[in-house]
Amino acid sequence: MPSYPNVTAEMMQEMDRMITGRLTPPENARKRTLENRKTGAMEEHLRWNESLQVVAVEVSTTISNASDEHDVYSVKFNVTASKGTGLNIGGTTYLKARINSVALEAGNKDSGQYKMSISTLVRLAQLVRSAGFPIKGGLTSAQMAAYFPANGESPLIGKEIFAEIHQNESELASSGWNEEVANIFPLRVAKATTEV
């Protein structure tokens, strides 16, 4: 006769993370339900903050479904114990963002491709600044190449930051949810006080 295991809530939480690839949202995550502009479906959005360490940086070029060339920036993070929920320590999450250099250079602020590219630049600049590298007067293309090199040897690797995690329901995602690092801040951990 088989010996049936007992699956605890803690085990289920860890297995769920393995099955879906999602971090576990805390009970106090900020929640909103928004209408998807493309499909009209009502989708739940969850947001909360975690401390993260950069473990890999990749940059590549791809052609989108609309035949546009995009530079794809992918930053892999591990959740640390420094600050946050404590639920996801050791878990993995990503910043995956695209830049359409033609749309960016054209500067049409009404273009979706331009808005996407600017949004990417905002998050990349947030990451550089939050990792402790001062940004004075912008970032040159040489500085961007140094922080986000094609060979993956970035000075950002090993740096710890504080970030907002954003999860939203999505029919297109295999798990039914998308997850991204939405906003990035410097990690400030309160120092322990000593009693006299």
Image: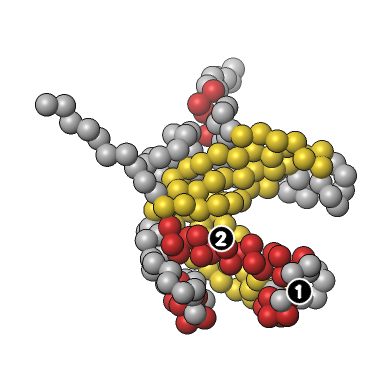
Identify the residue under disc 1. 108
The disc placed on residue 184 is: none
- From mark 2 to mark 1, how far is it between C-alphas? 20 Å
How far across and down, in percent of the image, does residue 60 sit? Answer: 60, 73
Quarter of the image containing the N terminus?
Answer: top right
How far across and down, in percent of the image, does residue 102 sit? Answer: 71, 80
> Amino acid type of disc 1?
Asn
Q: Residue at x 38, y 66 (%)?
A: 133
The disc placed on residue 123 is: 2
How far across and down, in percent of the image, does residue 175 sit? Answer: 70, 43
Please tell me how crowded label 2 is: few (under 14), some (14-19), or many (20+) other residues with Cα within 10 Å.
some
Question: Which quadrant holds residue 129?
Answer: bottom left
How far across and down, in percent of the image, does residue 115 sit? Answer: 71, 65
Quarter of the image containing the C terminus?
Answer: top left
Q: Residue at x 42, y 52 (%)?
A: 186
Labels 2 and 1: the sequence-earlier one: 1
Judge left or right: residue 153 versus residue 170: left
The answer to whether 73 is drawn above or below residue 25 in the figure is: below
The answer to whether 111 is drawn above or below residue 180 in the figure is: below
Q: Nearer the viewer, residue 23 or 101?
A: 101
- Nearer the observer, disc 2 or disc 1? 1
Q: Nearer the viewer, residue 101 or 95?
A: 101
Q: Residue at x 64, y 67 (%)?
A: 118
The answer to whether 62 is drawn above or below residue 173 in the figure is: below
